[in-house]
Image (tube, rainbow, N blue to C red):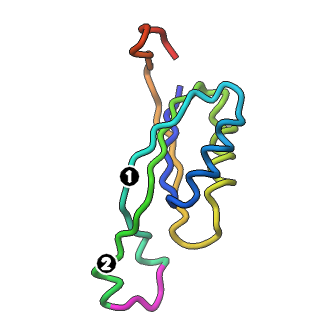
Amino acid sequence: MKEIRAICRPNRLHALRQALRGIPGCPGVTVLQAKGFSAPALIYNRTLEEDLTDFTEKVMVCIVVTDNMVDTIVDVIMRECRTGRIGDGIVWLVPVEGAFRIQDSSPL
């Protein structure tokens, strides 16, 4: 199992949610508010104001999935969240030893 974590623009969340709902067996999504900034080396001609206020609103999407669903879900995240501009976000994978539903203690 893996946890897929993605940081993306808040305005891309609706499209991402709709696309994920279209994947059979998608287990659900947790969304957290986040703030961040892009790698300084990627940004040119910054002003002092930008240096002091460069944290932008983002969302973090977390999804725990079986290994066979990872590629499909990562592909959907990349497709739905990409605008082609600096600050689109990042996706990474975290190994999961186990996961259980609280409701009935069943494994995912």
Look at mark 1 in the image and give the residue it sits on.
33
Q: Label 2, secondary structure: give it.
A: loop
Residue located 61% across and 57% down the image:
81
Q: Label 1, secondary structure: give it.
A: strand
Sort mark 1 into few (<14), some (14-19) or many (20+) by Cα contacts within 10 Å.
few
Residue located 31% across and 78% down the image:
53
Q: Is residue 76 above or below residue 50?
A: above
Look at mark 2 in the image and give the residue it sits on.
53
Residue 6 percent location from the top left of the image = 50, 49
- Judged by its main secondary structure, the magenta piece is loop
Q: Quadrant of residue 103?
A: top left
Question: In this rendering, would 81 be left or right of 7?
Answer: right
Residue nearer the viewer, 98 or 29: 29
Residue nearer the viewer, 22 or 52: 22
Magenta residues, as a range? 43-47
Total numbered circles: 2
Q: Which three-letter amino acid code belongs to the residue tagged 2?
A: Thr
Q: Does the magenta portion include 45?
A: yes
Residue 15 percent location from the top left of the image = 64, 52
Q: Does the magenta portion include 17?
A: no
Q: Quadrant of residue 17?
A: top right
